[in-house]
């Protein structure tokens, strides 16, 4: 009799756990997906940063483990694209970047990469401010600490140092790239150029 009761308790507990798994894993993710689609439908109504925050904050704050990371990737990717054009006002893109930065997962390579690229483009398009350069560098390094051979992060660091005329660091990352992809002719030429400039400045 006791064995039967224990077995029933265990079966009931397993059923409850399974239902909770379905709810938190599938149902909440489905709801969050619908919320995100609805938010996208309101994009035309967005006329300010506050509108943007109000529309997407509800989606981002709704916890759904299987879809949390994906929604942040989509939104941060859109912000990268916006900053890369350099057409939006600086204050607007800074506020958007600050907003999404609060939601990034420090262990997610794409979250870190998108944030690094955002600061990279901020540096290029909005006055080459030192703090943007440092932030881009910081996020790219975080990516490379997790995925040392990830091409967008390696090439991102290389381009960041090339554009900021840091020949020593550009050479360092160019050599790192060539160790992995020795046939990359663009990097070979870039390193030759850096070498020639260094010799010229002696």
Image (spheres, rainbow, N blue to C red):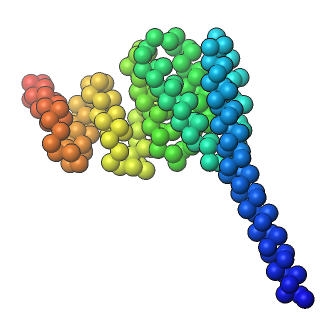
- Does residue 65 appear in this view? yes
Q: Is residue 91 left or right of residue 31?
A: left
Q: Position of residue 45 (x, y in %)?
A: 66, 13
Image quadrant in which you'd find residue 152:
top left
Q: Position of residue 144 (x, y in %)?
A: 39, 46
Q: Position of residue 41 (x, y in %)?
A: 64, 21
Q: Position of residue 75 (x, y in %)?
A: 56, 30
Viewer-closest of 37 and 155 = 37
Q: Quarter holding the C terminus?
A: top left
Marker count (numbered):
0
Above or below, comparing residue 107 to residue 19 in the picture: above
Viewer-closest of 133 and 75 = 75
Q: Quarter holding the N terminus?
A: bottom right
Q: Residue at x 79, y 73 (%)?
A: 11
- Does residue 134 appear in this view? no
Above or below, comparing residue 199 to residue 51 in the picture: below
């Amino acid at each position: 009799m006791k064995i039967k009761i224990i077995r029933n308790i265990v079966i009931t507990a397993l059923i409850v756990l399974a239902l909770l798994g379905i709810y938190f894993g599938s149902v909440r993710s489905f709801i969050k997906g619908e919320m995100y689609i609805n938010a996208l439908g309101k994009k035309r109504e967005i006329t300010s940063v506050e509108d943007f925050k109000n529309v997407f904050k509800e989606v981002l704050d709704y916890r759904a483990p299987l879809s949390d990371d994906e929604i942040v990737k989509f939104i941060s990717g859109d912000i990268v694209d916006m900053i890369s054009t350099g057409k939006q006002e600086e204050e607007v893109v800074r506020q958007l970047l600050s907003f999404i930065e609060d939601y990034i997962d420090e262990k997610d390579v794409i979250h870190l990469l998108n944030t690094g690229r955002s600061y990279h483009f901020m540096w290029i398009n909005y006055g080459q401010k030192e703090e943007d350069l440092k932030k881009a560098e910081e996020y790219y390094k975080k990516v490379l600490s997790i995925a040392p051979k990830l091409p967008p992060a390696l090439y991102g660091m290389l381009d960041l140092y090339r554009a900021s005329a840091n020949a020593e660091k550009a050479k360092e990352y160019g050599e790192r790239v060539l160790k992995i992809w020795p046939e990359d002719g663009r990097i070979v030429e870039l390193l030759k150029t850096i070498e020639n400039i260094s010799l010229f400045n002696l």
